[in-house]
Amino acid sequence: MAVDSRFFDEMEARIPRGGVRTRFAPSPTGYMHVGNLRTALYTWLIARHAGGTFILRIEDTDQGRLVEGATDVIYRTMAECGLTHDEGPDVGGPVGPYIQSERRDLYGKYAHLLVEKGAAYYCFCEKTESEEDSGDWDRAADPCRDLSAAEVEANLAAGKPYVIRQRIPLDGSTTFHDVSFGDITVENKTLDDQVLLKRDGLPTYNFANVVDDHLMGITHVVRGSEYLSSAPKYNLLYEAFGWEIPTYVHCSPVMRDQHNKMSKRHGDPSYEDLIAQGYLTGAVLNYVALLGWAPKGERSEQEIFSLQELADVFDIAGISKSPAIFDLAKLDHFNAVYLRALPPEDFARIAEPYIRQSVKNPAVDAAAVAALLQARCEHLTDIPEKVDFFDALPDYDLALFTNKKSKTDADVSKAMLEAAVPALEALPEWTQEGVHDALIGLAEKLGVKNATLMWPVRIAAAGKQVTPGGAVEICHILGREETLRRLRLGLERLSA
Ligand code: GLU
């Protein structure tokens, strides 16, 4: 089958050259696991740091693994994270299409070109991948590797189904270079004649990624270290085509513990799971950036980075080859920092739906509740349980009135509430300052520590041992009527 060199020349002419070009190339699995998010982030950072181009390519050649709506998850996650792409299926670009299934014809042409160059061959027999992997199969004795041109033609003319396999040299070795792993050399005899084009004419991932990375002008290939063992075969393909080999950046896996990779199957959270669990996107990205990468120089101690700051300082030399363990407690810490750092109105906007899950009473001001929460919140999902008492006073245990530090017990609490009710009743206006001054003034008048008065007031108002905010804030938010109702109720229960 003669190949038309004009086609290949035109494809070469389209390739943008000169700048850094990286791509994130997810398979549409329906979720974004943490390791994938990190790959996307590093890939984006390399491009942005260099003022280069970031490309999104959808790798859907494995039709058996396709999941409905899965590409939407990719677009949504990338957009939410601010990992904007310059070229991709939705925005187009000079080297599209950017979805592998739409590039189908192309791979066949390149596979046939490789056959012409002698670096691949038609295989008409039934040997399977597993035979190759098991090593029970002797490449040197394989009949398909050395079929004559006439035999191939005859088989093709007879319509025999075939795959196209890579012709790996029988001896010698192949070396490739990775940014973090350095030079790795393997004996060619340990590599299999991998399938490049399947019987259905679709490429394998192993072939498509090389063709696409070249035709899209990718300069830095960032991917998981599970692809390290395939890299020598990719290099042999690049060499056979006469193409420049990109810079390889293989990232070690994100682990759930010392021995196991994080995995959705074992219940480890994906990006969407983390967001549903109340983590902020910024906190997740910041934490994930530091899983396997560390800043150098004057920033080496810095922990909190905005996406822009990361883009400014990101350097592939800081990527570590040792696997990183994903630590939820560490992520909690980042999340709390991010929640505290939000402008109060942004926090209130984000927190409101969580507050409203348990505080249905419209008279309760969600922004005022949010103000109490902001400094005391690690996850947004903790909020409903923390503020439920605003809606309904829990059926609390009177033992809560006893607190050593505040010097209160049931009797003291009763006396305090007896004094607090009329003092609050007498307030002309129900402001936070008014409530504050009335209670502080009352404690002074009674000659007790502020806490001795505030403790029982807060317990009676909230019915909970631990609350966001103190007695003053809680009473203020509850309003005059509800506060007095609750304090009187506490008093009644203590008197019974
Ligand atoms: N589609 C591959 C994956 O999701 C991409 C690997 C690569 O970046 O080359 O694992």
Image: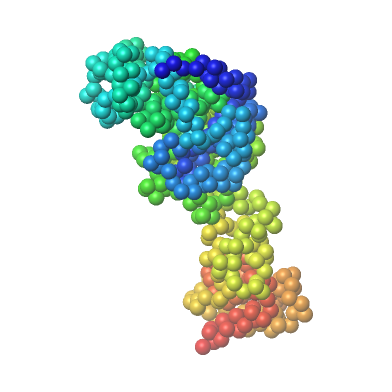
Q: Residue at x 58, y 74 (%)?
A: 391
Quadrant into which the N terminus falls: top left
Determine whether 379 is above or below 168 in the image. below
Please name the colour scheme applied to the rendered image.
rainbow
- 138 to the left or right of 432: left
- 321 to the left or right of 124: right
Residue at the front extreme of this rendering: 157
Residue 474, by quadrant, is bottom right
Q: Residue 279 at x, y = what percent?
A: 54, 51
Residue at the right extreme of this rendering: 428
- 62 to the left or right of 41: left
Determine whether 94 is above or below 65 in the image. above
- 416 to the left or right of 234: right
Residue at the left extreme of this rendering: 136
Q: Residue 282 at x, y = what percent?
A: 59, 46
Please state which of residues 464 and 344 is positioned toward the viewer in this rendering. Answer: 344
> Is residue 449 at all visible to an observer of this figure?
no
Please state which of residues 252 and 204 is positioned toward the viewer in this rendering. Answer: 204
Q: Residue 372 at x, y = what percent?
A: 64, 62
Q: Residue 128 at x, y = what percent?
A: 27, 29
Please state which of residues 373 and 211 is positioned toward the viewer in this rendering. Answer: 211
Q: Residue at x 65, y 50 (%)?
A: 341
Q: Residue at x 53, y 71 (%)?
A: 464
Q: Residue at x 56, y 24 (%)?
A: 217
Residue 163, by quadrant, is top left
> Is residue 148 at all visible to an observer of this figure?
yes
